Amino acid sequence: MLEYNKIKFEIEKRYFNLKHFIPKYTDMKPDGFRLACENKTLKVRTLQLISNTLKLPMSYWFEEEDKLLMAEGEIQYGETFPEIIKRLNALLEDSMDDKKRMKMEIDELKDRLGIRKVGT
């Protein structure tokens, strides 16, 4: 998701004043820009103008979101079905390993505390 504060930070990091930068390099006023970001209505053209001026690729604004999607196991563009199945199986194996590790840690803690299951 595109964040106003991230754009504002990058503009100010380069010693630009947001109130002067936005009208000079885009076709917006600062308040309109802020509202467009908050309402998720910022035009791609406006973001491209900002990216060009700051010399940042458009992907920069979405990199964190892309990483989160990949971490969640979302289908990646261009993946074949065997690649998807292989990746999801790896995620499943990792999950099972985590479950086994957590069960072992719980059992170890129960032993330390002297907690036993009924009937054992």
Image (cartoon, helix red, strand yellow):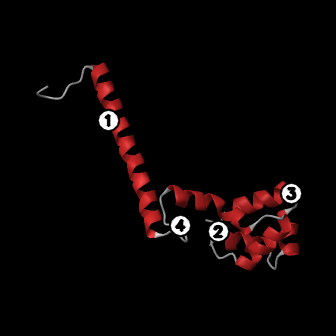
Tell which circle, 2 or 4, labels the residue nearer the N-terminal end: 2
The residue at the point 65 percent across, 64 percent down is 62
- Where is residue 2 shown, x and y percent of the image? 65, 66
Quarter of the view holding residue 46: bottom right
- Label 4 secondary element: loop
* Residue type at tag 2: Glu
- Where is residue 19 shown, x and y percent of the image? 84, 67
The residue at the point 46 percent across, 58 percent down is 87
Tell which circle, 1 or 2, labels the residue nearer the N-terminal end: 2
- Where is residue 39 shown, x and y percent of the image? 62, 72
Foreground mark, 2 or 3, reads 3
User: What numbered label is drawn on residue 14?
Assistant: 3
For the residues labelled 2 and 3, the Cα–Cα distance comes to 22 Å
Which of the pair 68/81 is nearer the observer?
A: 81
For the residues labelled 3 and 1, the Cα–Cα distance comes to 50 Å
Q: Is residue 4 above or below residue 91?
A: below
User: What numbered label is drawn on residue 76?
Assistant: 4
- Label 2 secondary element: helix
Left or right for 16, reference 81 = right
Which residue carries the number 1 mark? 103
* Residue type at tag 4: Gln
* Residue type at tag 1: Lys
Q: Is there a contact, CB below 8 Å, between mark 1 and mark 2?
A: no
Bin the neighbour count of mark 1 within 10 Å (Cα to Cα): few under 14, some 14-19, many 20 and up: few
User: What numbered label is drawn on residue 40?
Assistant: none
For the residues labelled 1 and 4, the Cα–Cα distance comes to 32 Å
Quarter of the picture holding the N terminus:
bottom right
